[in-house]
Amino acid sequence: MSTTKTLALPAGLPAPNQEPLTKPYWEGTRAGKLVIQRCGGCGAHQWGPEWLCHRCHSFDLGWEEVAPRGRIWSWQRPHHPVHPALTGHGPYTIVLVELPHAGKVRMVGNLLCASDAKVEIGADVEAVFEPHDEADPPYTLVQWKVVD
Amino acid sequence: MSERTLRGKVAIAGIGETAYYKHGQSPDAEFKLALRAVLAACEDAGIDPREVDGFASYGDDRSQAVRLAAALGIKELRFSNMHWGGGGGGVAASVANAAAAVHSGLANCVIAFRSLAQGQFARYGLSRLGDTAKDDDAFLAPYGLISPAQRFAMKITRFMTEHGIRHEALRSIAMASYHHAQNNPRAVMHGRPLTEEKYDASRWIIEPFHRLFDCCQENDGAGAVLVVPADRAKDLPHRPTYLLGTAQGGHHRSAAPVHNAPEYASAHFPTVAKNMWAMARLGPQDVDVVQAYENFTGGVLLSLVEHGFVDPRTANQFLVPENLFAPSGKMPLNTSGGNLAECYMHGLEMVNEAVRQLRGTANNQVPDAEIVAVLGGPMVTPVSSLVLGTEATL
Ligand SMILES: [Zn+2]
């Protein structure tokens, strides 16, 4: 497991609300684990969290740790600051990461890279856990870096 | 059993709009703008506003039907309807809902409208989140994915990269809107032409496909159309414009959480376009003029592709300015200036423009236009679109 003390983006962006439906995910990231929903009825992975399995309509959705690896499905690099915390920060990179070994679910995070780095769709990436210990309640985000 | 369709059953008898303003510049309150647009549409149709008996809108419009009905002193309210979903995804759906009400006998004379004074309320392009982000936003906002442009950008990156479509194709879409606005005195960007050089030099909003001129403005104003049964429209002042086909909705799990829609790189029209063409008994080859909602130019590309107007394999060759300019382009696009350059009235201005083209009264008139398509706000979900035609197309 890989963690970082440096924040990808400046402090002050909204913190994730840890709701009953999503709490197991946030408990997982605090422990350095990537956990997503897996259906007890049909075995399918599901993301983002929902009360019902969209395939078999079972409410028996459990949570399972998955390997913190994926590949870039798409990306963007915002320049224009849309939140006061981002004013003056400059461009940053957002990636949509597909987890091929977990039902091809996709997750959103920041790509840890230079602000002018070339980004390739299909590139292999691995998760980097970014704890926000000072927050109340504390939470840990999941960022991504390209695998060399 | 009779065929279940709206084809040819209703007409748009009147169109109305306020003056269009840069955001924050409207001297009138948002509700007053709505009233002005409704009255203008009634006057255009030659119908007493007290005869209106229904209102349909979208995008969480703040001008409620009951308040409009009271303010206008209408005799009887028989239909009030708000279409779910944000932005302009519901623009065609509001007309469709008005049409369904009129055709089914729920109401007789229904206004579809949008009123928007963003200067008086929160702006769309800036974060409206508090200290914590809920639901989907909990997995997006902490990573700086907040604005509408950012919610859609990765669809566009994926589609354009997959198909090798160049940014110049999007530039042509922006050029078409600004070109047409120069001939339209109503347009907010009238007198402010766009050149390729100016576009290329404009700042990045989001790499790799959103420069400043790829993004819509924010504006103040209101627009309205009046929907009546087809047979009534024949006795009114203007050449009738008929609804030929319309559809709304989204394809399989288009709203799946956290960017997990199976068909991700989409404007969400695959099934909606199919259903619209089926009702209209037409296809893209039959259309004379296209109004395609620009929230972002990339969304226009996706929506043109999903309605069959553009083949992704030839998009680079086809999406050049001369093909998109009225009167002689192969596919005149956004002939009033659209959201980018006429006014960001969440697409209602495009319905008005479609009617003008069919009446022969547009500022950038396409000669003998008989069929016009309006593709509503792309990439949100649900989306909606419609196609209108003259009497000859019935
Ligand atoms: Zn299941």
Image: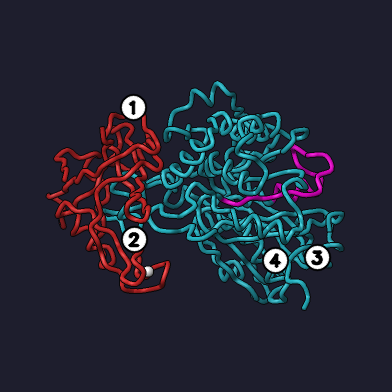
10 Å crowding of disc 4: few (<14), some (14-19), many (20+): many
Q: Nearer the viewer, mark 2 or mark 4?
A: 2
Q: Which residues are magenta?
A: B352-377
What is the chain letter for disc 3? B
Q: Position of residue A27 (x, y in %)?
A: 18, 59
- Coloring basis for residues: by chain
B155, B299: nearer the viewer: B155
Task: Say which residue label 4 marks.
Answer: B99
Q: Are marks 1 and 4 in contact (CB under 8 Å)?
A: no
Marked residue nearer the N-terminal end (2 or 1): 2
- Output the letter for the chain in red: A
B93 left or right of B47 in image: left
What is the chain letter for disc 4? B
Q: Nearer the viewer, mark 1 or mark 4?
A: 1
| Residue lying at 33% horizontally and 67% vertically, measured from the top left | A39
What's the mark number on residue A116? 1
Q: Identify the amino acid type marked 3.
A: Ala
Give the image quarter of residue B78. Answer: bottom right
| Residue lying at 31% horizontally and 59% vertically, measured from the top left | B134
What SS does tag 4 mark? helix
